[in-house]
Image (cartoon, helix red, strand yellow):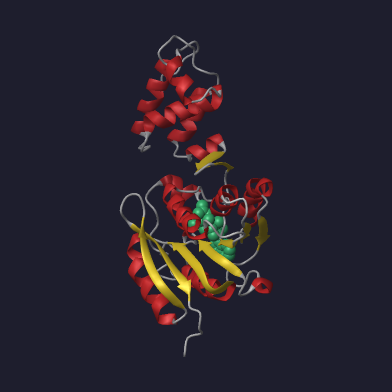
Amino acid sequence: MTFYPGQSLADAVREAAAVLSEAGVPTPRVDAELLADHLLGVGLGRLRAMLLGDSPAPEGYAELVSERAGRVPLQHITGVAYFRHLELRVGPGVFIPRPETESVVQLVIDHIAGMPSPKVVDLGTGSGAIAGSIAHELPGSEVFAVEFSSLAHAWAAKNLEPLGVTLLQGDLRNALPEHDGTFDVVVSNPPYIPAEAIPNEPEVALHDPPEALYGGGADGMELPTAAAASAARLLKPGGFFVMEHAEVQAEWIAAHLRRTGHWTDIATHYDLNGKERATSALLAKTAPDE
Ligand SMILES: C[S@@+](CC[C@H](N)C(=O)[O-])C[C@H]1O[C@@H](n2cnc3c(N)ncnc32)[C@H](O)[C@@H]1O
């Protein structure tokens, strides 16, 4: 690495982008700029203006670039993840929220917009991205969030407390029994990766917590199936369930929901890349015959 004292910001960012590209980071130039901005705190627009002049590189920049070149997630270095309108605090022990989950939140918001005080629960909240966004964007809603991992729960507490979300540490399989049959919406982005499908990106494989990734069982469907069963228990008749999943799981999940006999209006939804990444359904108003 050819960082040196007194180096200009423009040269250091150019060098950093080359180092990150060599390390296989998918967006090297943006990451190089965001790391510089993390130290300078001026915002990307001003940073890009500074890159046109002869500002010096900030102290400590080479160290952050070297960490990122080791494929530590950018958000673990900066301590922040941006999700819809929220700036979430994140770090080791919590799943970094992903852009495709923003579309899942939109499905919830579209469904409950206009309801006076919808009651919503997010099962497996992680950083609190889904629950926090709903509470923030629909201030009249009553939002609950459930998280099993004590580390993730601690991150969620930092993010959700200011937003008035009721956060519980517990298992989505049996959480909130005293609220059975009372929710308007159950939303979940549960772990769903099959046991053998270890992700390729080091940021995910080595830094996202395993309990946030692997859904249980060879096909990864144990926790998604459990989330659907809990949704059937927690929702009011006619209540809305939406769950994120892998593209290849869409058909199986829709068929599973149909088989249980609990659901109507089962629908698959696309993310911004046109992939089938979420399924929604309404809880039937009458119990299944079986
Ligand atoms: C894929 S992450 C999603 C986190 C967050 N909802 C998001 O979309 O960014 C799944 C989350 O479910 C949590 N989890 C795993 N098993 C759980 C269980 N049995 N009960 C509750 N939460 C669980 C994990 O710790 C993790 O935070």
- Say if residue 209 shows up in the picture: no
Seen in the picture, residue 274 relative to 259 is either above or below; the reply is above
Seen in the picture, residue 116 relative to 69 is either above or below; the reply is below
Which of the pair 20/230 is nearer the observer? 230
Give x and y (percent) for residue 5: 50, 12
Which of the pair 239/93 is nearer the observer? 239
- Say if residue 256 shows up in the picture: yes
Q: Decide if residue 49 is on the left or right side of residue 156.
A: left
Residue in the image at 49% along x and 44% along y: 84
Residue in the image at 57% along x and 76% along y: 233
Q: Extreme bottom residue here?
A: 290
Give x and y (percent) for residue 49: 43, 16
* Count of numbered marks: 0
Residue in the image at 47% along x and 56% along y: 110
Give the quarter of the figure containing the N terminus: top left
Residue in the image at 36% along x and 38% along y: 26
Seen in the picture, residue 162 relative to 251 is either above or below; the reply is above
Q: Decide if residue 196 is on the left or right side of residue 74.
A: left
Give x and y (percent) for residue 185: 54, 65
Which of the pair 160/280 is nearer the observer? 280
Q: Extreme left residue here?
A: 274
Q: Quadrant of ligand 1?
A: bottom right
